[in-house]
Amino acid sequence: MQVQLSKNTKKTPKPTCFHCGESCQTTHFEQDEKHFCCHGCLTVYELLKENELCQYYDLNDKAGIRQQINAKIEKFTYLDLPEVQSKLFDFTDEKTANLTFFIPTIHCSSCIWLLENLYKLNENIFFSQINFLKKQLAVSFDTQKIKLSEVVALLSNIGYEPLITLNDVQEQNNAQKDTKIRQANRRLIAQIAVAGFVFGNVMMLSFPEYFGFDSFSEHHFKPLFNALNLILSLPVLFFSGQNYIAISYQNLRKGILQVDFPLALGMLVLWIRSIFEIFTETGAGYIDSMSGLIFFLLVGRWFQQHTYQTLRYDRDFKSYFPVAVMVKTENNEEKPVQITDLEVGNKIIIRNEEIIPADTQLLRGNAQIDYSFITGEANLIPKAVGETIYAGARQKGEQIELLVLKKASQSYLTQLWNNVSFDKSKEENSIIQAILNKYFTIVLILIACFSASYWLFFEKKVSIAIHVFTAVLVIACPCALSLGSQFALGTALRILGKYKFYLKNVHTVEQIAENDTLVFDKTGTITENQESEIAFKTYEGLAPAQALSEELITSISALCSNSMHPLSAKIVRFLKNKLKEKIYFEEIQNTNTISSFKEHAGKGLEGIVNGHHLLLGSKKMMIENGINNFSGSQTNENELDTKVYVVVDAIYKGYFVFKNKYRKEIKETIKNLHQSKLDLYLLSGDNEGEKENLKLFFPKESNLFFQQNPHQKLAFIQHLQAQNSHVMMIGDGLNDAGALLQSNVGVAITENTTYFTPASDAILDATALPLLPKFINFCRFAVNKIRQSFGIAIVYNLIGLFFAVQGLLSPLIAAILMPVSSITVILFTTWGVKRFRF
């Protein structure tokens, strides 16, 4: 399309730029009957139009950022240097790179929409996601088809050039965020100071009018005082009240009604009416009411912010699950350490299916890395000794030893945990809230208009009509409705974390409150991992000591040490006790060579240790591998016992038999859960050996299911959901990750070292399992408090409207009561939730 270059030679109003909203100068550009202040803004418009992204301009007024020049890619070529990228990338492999940009120019919903649609501008960008509060953009792109410099140039050309510093990106971002918060706080205080100064002086200048003192001067001072009041109204309206008016105006132009619109409308009505009365000399106007309204609204906003800062929960530091990892000490011993305490240079041990919490270098072992937690692709990538492995990867296979290269970031793991790939929430709460606010605002404006019309046309009282109109708009502001749930859920999240129940996000609280069905895994969930009766039995005529040689003990232990399964851990502890000297045991174990390892979910382990092929698992797994001769087994064995069979080089050696020990108070816990009106089920991969014991715990025998493999557990959860059940699944996250992910709420139960699985919505410390009934009741209690807060806010609005429409409530009093209501609702929900007793 032809681009026309225009010159403003006549003294006509200057057009505004369609992209950034700034005034066009003498020379500007026109295209599609739209004006652009510079070639940069025109280029961005053409780019968006070409990719059918012009909806960007429908979301907000002045959505764009002015472009003075197009960014040249040469400016960013330094970003393609490997040493630079190593400091910026959160993750990279031969195809994909992930990193987080700090973009100071993010300012509105249009920014969010455009930046999260970058893949439409360039198909080599896989995804982009905004953290609006931190002004951060997480980007994943194809390194084989687009360079980092090209990604940054694209962002710069559409008006969102990242702020990049190589010294310490995260600290720089935090400093920028803190600076902006301090600037915003200082501006708010300045706005309050101006509004308070004007309010006080306007009241002083209005006293002669109020009390008739001006009659002594034959009203010579009245025009002067009114003029001074009008002049003083300008800074209070256009500086102190700027945020209310400007944001409301921008949104209104795009057909968006938000919660501040009624307040801005009330201010303007008072000001315009005041101008009319002062210039026509029909009255003193309402400058005092307008100034007081803005002053008390700002004071209320400051109190709200102060309350928020006092009560807020911080996901990055306070309400976080304590992910731990095994660190290898100088004495070759292993001890659990929380990832926040990891230091560069630490050696960590990662077993099969464990998440790697920090950027590391492989020191020992055969690493088969699954980056699906980061990229969404489940391909295994082999790593050689000396190669770098990024945080968020999962080891698949044998135990590996890693050297920590960079301090672990819990906030980064939180970001991965909340990745859309694992997000079960189908509801857009912010959109629902926006719709509620929109219709609430429309109804509120209609009530204000009808009430004012009654006083204006039926009672013929203009002054009361204006007061009624403004008071209605102010008193019924829906701020309390939008704030109550945020504080209640945030407080609940923090309290649950205090009792070792760590939730993925605040929406999980609501999900738990809606649960009507609870499904347990057995092994490692309701049974103890640390304590269990275990014995090794072999075929008749051979003593266990002969079948279980020292070499075989260390080989089996080495194989089991690579697995996180509870039975593997029990076998390792049992075998350590067989060799009484622990140091001697570990010295022998460290000499073992594992050339192959594989864990068959729900079946057992397979590997090659010291050149021997080992199979450990269920009888079914042995039969699948061609081992059919168990005729030599002891004749008195109970087929219903939990067993792990041992086969070495296709020769059956015997089996480990387990007598499970159930967790303390599990019977009382299940009883309390049943009393909480939950349907209870048990899914176990073991046989029915424990069925008689479990019948004493669970109220319905028909709800006990055994010999369930991971696929059957997943199918069972889907079956329950097809019957409209809202399901919570509790498991160890090993063989039931699919069921945890499918369930409405998946809870991974952990022992000493937290086993972190992205499939879970919550992590429960095993010692806190007896509190599970109270946790569920607490979540229900918190959601009920939110509903009660909605009721309080609605009752408050109805009472306020009752007095406002009758002209019994001035805008000034309404401005005082409005923030008081919001703070009241916040305190009610927050302290109400805290009143729950565990």
Image (spheres, helix red, strand yellow):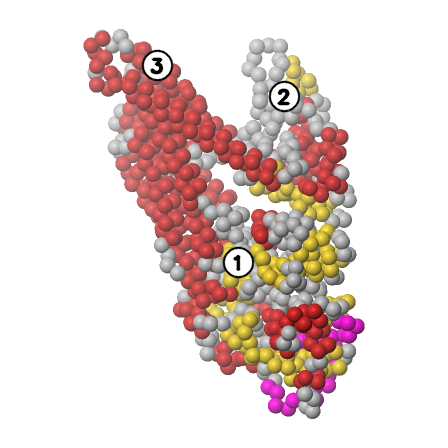
Q: CA distance from mark 1 to mark 2?
A: 51 Å
Measured as percent of width and height from the top left, residue 605 is found at: 69, 71
Read off the residue under disc 3. Answer: 228
Measured as percent of width and height from the top left, residue 204 is found at: 28, 19
Measured as percent of width and height from the top left, residue 797 is found at: 33, 40
Read off the residue under disc 1. Answer: 762
Left or right: 381 with respect to 582?
Answer: right
Q: Quadrant of the C terminus?
A: bottom left
Left or right: 32 with respect to 802?
Answer: right
Residue 176 inside the magenta-drawn segment: no
- For the record, the magenta segment spans 609-638
Identified by mark 1, the residue type is: Ala
Identity of the residue drawn at 66% across and 46% down: 90
Q: Reply above or below: 704 against 118.
A: below
Identity of the residue drawn at 34% across and 46% down: 792
Identified by mark 2, the residue type is: Cys
How many neighbours does mark 1 have within 10 angstroms: few (below 14), some (14-19), or many (20 or more)?
Answer: many
How many neighbours does mark 2 have within 10 angstroms: few (below 14), some (14-19), or many (20 or more)?
Answer: many
Measured as percent of width and height from the top left, residue 16 is found at: 58, 21
Identity of the residue drawn at 41% across and 38% down: 306
Q: Reply above or below: 237 against 9.
A: below
Q: CA distance from mark 1 to mark 3?
A: 62 Å
Read off the residue under disc 2. Answer: 37
